[in-house]
Amino acid sequence: MNTHNVNTAASESSKTWVEQVNTRNFPPQLAEEMRFLASLCDKEERMLHIERLELIDGAALHIVDLVCDSVTDWSVPRPLIPAAVVAAWLLAKKMVTSAFEEGGEAEWDRIEKSLRADLIVGYYHP
């Protein structure tokens, strides 16, 4: 067994969300919102659990708006979204599902449905 891989995997999994967010290629507003979401998920701010979840939900829904704003081409059957924005979306999913624990998948499904609805509206009414 290669112990180097075990040590690397353990250290990567112990990183905070803030440490995992690489905003280098993100649009500025998306970068800011991702850093905010990461700080909420890392529990850097002292607040009630329910308040934290409400803020995480709000940040995720704001990310939905930012993903829609990033569409580069509405003329194709599936709106084109930059790769960096897709990467941010996938990281946001990990953060939200982790923060909501056992209800995380259901919470993310609701957020994802919001994105789908907004993309459909944007596609038909650019």
Image (cartoon, grey):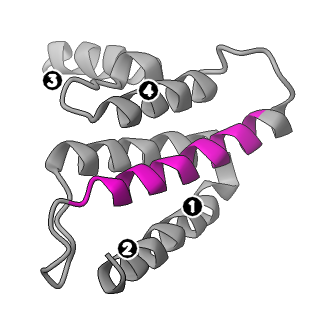
Residue type beneath disc 4: Glu
Which of discs 2 and 1 lies nearer the camera? The answer is 2
For label 4, the SS is helix
Q: CA distance from mark 4 to mark 1?
A: 24 Å
Type of secondary structure dominating the magenta stretch: helix
The residue at which mark 4 appears reads as 32
In the drawing, what numbered circle is on residue 105?
A: 1
For label 2, the SS is helix
Q: CA distance from mark 4 to mark 3?
A: 41 Å
The residue at which mark 2 appears reads as 119
Mark 2 or mark 1: name the one nearer the start of the chain: 1
Q: Position of residue 16 (x, y in %)?
A: 47, 18
Boundaries of the magenta span: 52-71
In the image, is residue 97 above or below residue 55? below
Residue type beneath disc 1: Glu
Q: Residue at x 38, y 15 (%)?
A: 19
**Residue 15 falls in image quadrant:** top left
In the image, is residue 18 above or below residue 28? above
Front residue of this view, candidates 107 and 85: 85
Q: CA distance from mark 1 to mark 3?
A: 34 Å
Q: Is residue 4 magenta?
A: no
The residue at which mark 3 appears reads as 1
